[in-house]
Image: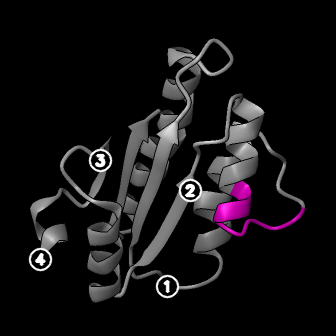
Amino acid sequence: MLLQTVRSNIVQSIRAYRVEDLMLAAQNADQHFLYANLTAAQSKQDVLDTIAESFLFPLHFGKNLDALYDCMTDLVHKAGSQPGFVVVLEQLPDNPRFDREAREQLLDVFRDAADFWAERKVAFRCFYSFQ
């Protein structure tokens, strides 16, 4: 029910949603739930490392924004038909080593991934929060 109230291909602040509710909604909709807790991350590299580890990216992950996009789109697309995605990026850093520009660049990758999946009629919802 929760996912029916959220546009299907969007990147937005987590706001009033709870991580547990999003996880249950993804399970109930038979969609992938991808979660990264970024509390310990301080830099762009920390963020990418944590996402790669949390999302179980392959060891050859390039640890840059282009590689992140590839893993969120091509790699998964080649794995076969996809039921949809609920992605949570919790506690994105907000400091001089990961400033507003770095956050926007990261979120742009997820916006591009949402567009990629929208073209394939696959729901992709990404929620984020800041430290």
Q: Which color mode does the image show?
A: one colour
In x, y percent, where is residue 17?
22, 55
Q: For residue 58: magenta?
A: yes
Is residue 92 or residue 109 the one in the foreground?
92
**How many labels sit on residues?**
4
The residue indicated by pointer 2 is: 36
The residue depicted at 23 percent of the width and 43 percent of the height is: 15
The residue indicated by pointer 1 is: 81
Label 3, label 1: how far apart the Cα atoms are: 27 Å
Mark 1 or 4: in front is: 4
Q: For residue 77: magenta?
A: no
Q: Is residue 61 left or right of residue 56?
A: right
Q: Which residues are magenta?
A: 52-59
CB atoms at circles 1 and 2 under 8 Å apart?
no
Is residue 6 or residue 120 the one in the foreground?
6
Which label's residue is closer to the chain start, 4 or 2?
4
Is residue 71 or residue 99 the one in the foreground?
99
The reply to whether residue 27 is in sight is yes
Q: Secondary structure at mark 2?
A: strand
* Residue 94: image tag: none
In x, y percent, where is residue 27?
35, 85
Circle 3 crowding by C-alpha within 10 Å: few under 14, some 14–19, many from 20: some
Circle 4 crowding by C-alpha within 10 Å: few under 14, some 14–19, many from 20: few
Of the 4 image quadrants, the one containing the N terminus is bottom left
The residue indicated by pointer 4 is: 1
Q: Secondary structure at mark 3?
A: loop
Q: Secondary structure at mark 1?
A: loop
The reply to whether residue 67 is in sight is no
The residue indicated by pointer 3 is: 14
